[in-house]
Image: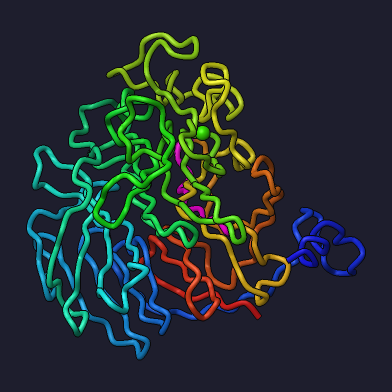
């Protein structure tokens, strides 16, 4: 590890190791389709033999065996052909079935976890479901909802900017370090939620496999003990840095400043869209997340000054982002640290995927970037991957057990990007 650090620190010594970005050179990638014609694939999780669980936002949970056969395991209301069906699970807007994670003890308990919207509690919440599967991985043997109170945006009338299901969060990952489950939740276009001590949207939760608060979360007194970090907008990426296992989030910005942030226990990510905070006045429907009305032609710097993703003036101790996508919002949906010598200069670097569609003057962001993040998590250099496939809206990035990077796209595909 020390030798690798040295290589990264003095790349100029090694001809060909450095690029103009300052990020060491990585491998060439080849592209192999894995599944296509899927319906909004949202996330994947692997067993060591290559078995891949995957979710589709408006259908449910399926599994692809290493031999390529696919079984549909748990379908939501009206989904066809699933071994099990749950009529309370639904999709709407950005919400539906989202993240999936495999229990670290899967070989003994055949258990996976999914994040899904559910109508079981009116007017709808997001839940984390613990699912024990049958022997053939074709149906659910036992379902236990271990988190039932993650906010969901039920109505378009909450404010003028987005529909139901917006800012829904949804990534779930077990830390390879402490073994706890980390859950990202969105602000649901509700101004009170991100800084609320008791409403668990706009947060990263850190829980055990029963949904109980993990020890050492460090949130301030009066906070729900499941809260690990708060003051998030809509994080849809969480990943753990090789070596330290420090968690990092990737989250969308409000027409400016997507952020990658190194998390610390009890940290405030600094997003507070309430009225009368940070020198703002009132806002439509008490949500200043797009304040002032940014339909105008202000550039991202002006927007950021009005509605910062990290309000360090109001919250001087807020966690600063390592990187803010050069002040742009381009739909940063997922992130994963790359690990292994096959990644060459990108070993230990962060891959982030973008799926922005270019609304409100924000440039299209269909790409994958590699971030070389400083050891202290406070700055980063960036290079952009030369994709061996057409530009796509990347919803999920996961490194598989074969060491390749698997991507899910809003175009309905899951594909393997193999370094060579
Ligand atoms: Ca922030």
Extreme residue toward the front, this view: 215
The quadrant of the picture occupied by the C terminus is bottom right
Q: Position of residue 418 (x, y in %)?
A: 57, 78
Q: Position of residue 382 (x, y in %)?
A: 68, 51
Extreme residue toward the bottom, this view: 67
The quadrant of the picture occupied by the N terminus is bottom right
| Residue nearest the viewer, comparing 10 with 413 | 10
Q: Is residue 293 left or right of residue 375?
A: left
Queried whether the magenta region covers residue 354, the answer comes back as yes
- Eyeballing the image, is 415 above or below 119? below
The image's colouring method is rainbow
Q: Tell how many labels.
A: 0
Q: Is residue 216 left or right of residue 420?
A: left
Q: Is residue 29 left or right of residue 295?
A: right
Q: Is residue 121 left or right of residue 284?
A: left
| Residue 205 in which image quadrant | top left
Q: Position of residue 370 (x, y in %)?
A: 64, 58
- Eyeballing the image, is 225 above or below 177? above
Q: Residue at x 65, y 66 (%)?
A: 386
| Residue nearest the viewer, comparing 45 with 266 | 266
- Eyeballing the image, is 272 above or below 266? above
Q: Residue at x 33, y 29 (%)?
A: 223
| Residue 235 in which image quadrant | top left
The range drawn in magenta is 351-360
Q: Residue at x 34, y 34 (%)?
A: 187
Extreme residue toward the right, this view: 13
| Residue nearest the viewer, comparing 26 with 136 | 136
Q: Position of residue 165 (x, y in %)?
A: 25, 42
- Name the magenta segment's main secondary structure: loop
Queried whether the magenta region covers residue 157, the answer comes back as no
| Residue 186 in which image quadrant | top left
């Amino acid at each position: 590890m020390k030798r690798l650090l040295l290589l990264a620190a003095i790349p100029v010594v090694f001809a060909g190791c450095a690029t103009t970005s300052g990020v060491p050179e990585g491998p060439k990638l080849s592209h192999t389709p894995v599944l296509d014609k899927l319906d909004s694939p949202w996330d994947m999780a692997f067993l060591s033999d290559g078995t891949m669980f995957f979710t589709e936002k408006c259908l449910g949970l399926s599994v692809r065996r290493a031999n390529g056969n696919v079984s549909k395991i748990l379908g939501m209301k009206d989904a066809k052909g699933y071994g099990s069906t749950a009529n309370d699970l639904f999709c709407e807007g950005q919400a539906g079935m989202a993240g999936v994670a495999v229990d670290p003890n899967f070989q003994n308990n055949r258990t996976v976890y999914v994040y899904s919207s559910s109508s079981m509690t009116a007017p709808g919440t997001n839940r984390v479901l613990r699912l024990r599967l049958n022997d053939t991985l074709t149906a659910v043997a036992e379902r236990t909802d271990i988190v039932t109170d993650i906010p969901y945006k039920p109505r378009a009338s909450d404010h003028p900017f987005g529909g139901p299901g917006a800012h829904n969060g949804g990534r779930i990952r077990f830390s390879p370090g402490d073994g706890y489950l980390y859950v990202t939740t969105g602000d649901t276009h509700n101004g009170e939620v991100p800084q609320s001590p008791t409403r668990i949207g706009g947060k990263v939760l850190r829980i055990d496999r029963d949904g109980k608060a993990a020890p050492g979360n460090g949130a301030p007194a009066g906070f729900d003990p499941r809260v690990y970090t708060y003051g998030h907008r809509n994080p849809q990426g969480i990943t753990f840095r090789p070596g330290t296992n420090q968690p990092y989030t990737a989250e969308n910005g409000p027409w400016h400043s997507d952020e990658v942030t190194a998390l610390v226990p009890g940290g405030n990510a600094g997003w507070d869209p309430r009225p009368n905070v940070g020198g703002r006045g009132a806002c439509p429907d008490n949500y200043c997340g797009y304040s002032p009305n940014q339909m105008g032609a202000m550039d991202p710097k002006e927007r950021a000054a009005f509605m910062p993703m990290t309000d360090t003036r109001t919250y001087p101790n807020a966690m600063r982002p390592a990187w803010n996508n050069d002040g742009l919002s381009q739909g940063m949906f997922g992130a994963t640290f790359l690990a292994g010598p096959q990644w060459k200069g990108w070993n230990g670097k962060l891959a982030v995927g973008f799926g922005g569609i270019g609304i409100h003057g924000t440039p299209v962001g269909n790409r994958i970037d590699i971030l070389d993040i400083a050891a202290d998590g406070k700055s980063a250099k960036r290079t952009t991957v030369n994709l061996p496939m057409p530009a796509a809206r990347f919803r999920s990035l996961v490194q598989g057990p074969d060491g390749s990077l698997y991507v899910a796209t809003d175009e309905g595909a899951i594909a393997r990007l193999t370094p060579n």
